[in-house]
Image: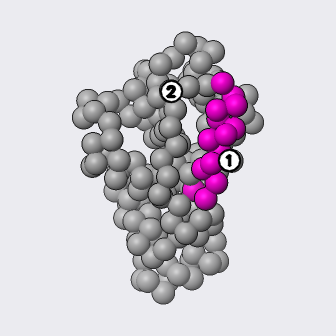
C-alpha cells in the first residue's frame, strides 16, 4: 500500500504547497512522502493523527528518511473510531457544504483540523492546499454513529 500511495502525485494537475491527510498508522503518509521525493516535488505534507499515536507515527516517518512534513495533533476527538457530538454535527454540515461525505473516524477529523489550521493562519493565505480524502465514508452509517445521529436529529 505504501508504494501505491506514492502514485498520488501522478494524478495531481498541479504541485500544491501543502497536502493534508488523516493518518492512523502513517503508512499512507510515508508512501506519499516517498513518491513526492522520488519525483522531486517540494510539497509539504501535513498529517492529522486520528488516534493517540503521534509519537509512533513520528518515529516511523523520521526513520523513513523523508523531510518537509508535519503531524498536527489535537484533533483525535477521543481516539480511534470515536467522535463527540460536535464532530458528528460538523461531519454532517461539512459534507453538505462540500458535497462529499466526511466520516467521523478519519476524514471528518482531518477536514475539521484543516479548517481550524486555515483559520488560525497555520499556512500563508496564498498557500495552495490539497486535502486528500482517503475514504472511510461509511463511518457515519455504522450502527454506533447512526444511532447517535438519530438521537441528535442529524
At label 1, counting other C-alpha atoms closer than 10 Å, the crowd grade (few under 14, some 14-19, many 20 or more) is few
**Left of 4 or right of it: where is 47?**
left
Which residue occupies 73% across, 28% down? 3
Q: Position of residue 154 (x, y in %)?
A: 42, 77
**On the rendered image, what quadrant is the N terminus found in?**
top right
Q: Is residue 60 magenta?
A: yes
Q: Earlier in the sequence, mark 2 or mark 1?
A: 1
59 in the magenta segment: yes
Q: Residues within 10 Å of mark 2 (few under 14, many from 20)?
A: few
Q: Residue at x 35, y 51 (%)?
A: 115
Is 129 placed above or below 108 here?
Answer: above
Q: Is residue 27 left or right of residue 54?
A: right
Q: Position of residue 6 (x, y in %)?
A: 65, 26
Q: Residue furthest bottom?
A: 151
* Secondary element at tag 1: helix
Give me the residue at 40% from left, 26% from top. Answer: 17
Any part of residue 4 in sight: no
Q: Is residue 154 above or below residue 99?
A: below
Q: Secondary structure at mark 2?
A: loop
Is residue 10 shown to the viewer in this render?
yes
What main secondary structure does the magenta stretch of the protein show? helix
Residue 105, image x and y in percent? Answer: 58, 61
- Which image quarter: residue 95? bottom left
In front of the other: 38 or 107: 38
Whether residues under marks 2 and 1 lie with C-beta atoms below 8 angstroms apart, the answer is no
Q: Residue furthest left?
A: 125
Q: Which span of residues is magenta-colored?
A: 50-65
Q: How far apart in space, not on screen, are marks 2 and 1 (Cα)? A: 18 Å
Q: Nearer the viewer, residue 135 or 128?
A: 128
Residue to which mark 2 is pinned: 68
Q: How many marks?
A: 2
Q: Which residue is mark 1?
A: 56
Amino acid at each position: 500500500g505504501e508504494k501505491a500511495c506514492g502514485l498520488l502525485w501522478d494524478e495531481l494537475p498541479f504541485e500544491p504547497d501543502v497536502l493534508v491527510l488523516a493518518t492512523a498508522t502513517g503508512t499512507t503518509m510515508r508512501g506519499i512522502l516517498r513518491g513526492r521525493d522520488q519525483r522531486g516535488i517540494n510539497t509539504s505534507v501535513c498529517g492529522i493523527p486520528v488516534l493517540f499515536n503521534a509519537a509512533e507515527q513520528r518515529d516511523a516517518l523520521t526513520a523513513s528518511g523523508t523531510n518537509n512534513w508535519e503531524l498536527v495533533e489535537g484533533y483525535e476527538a477521543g481516539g480511534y473510531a470515536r467522535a463527540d457530538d460536535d464532530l458528528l454535527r460538523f461531519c454532517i454540515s461539512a459534507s453538505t457544504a462540500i458535497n462529499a461525505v466526511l466520516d467521523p473516524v478519519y476524514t471528518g477529523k482531518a477536514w475539521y483540523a484543516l479548517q481550524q489550521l486555515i483559520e488560525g493562519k497555520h499556512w500563508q493565505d496564498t498557500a495552495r492546499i490539497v486535502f486528500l480524502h482517503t475514504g472511510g465514508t461509511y463511518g457515519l452509517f455504522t450502527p454506533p454513529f447512526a444511532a447517535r445521529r438519530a438521537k441528535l436529529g442529524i
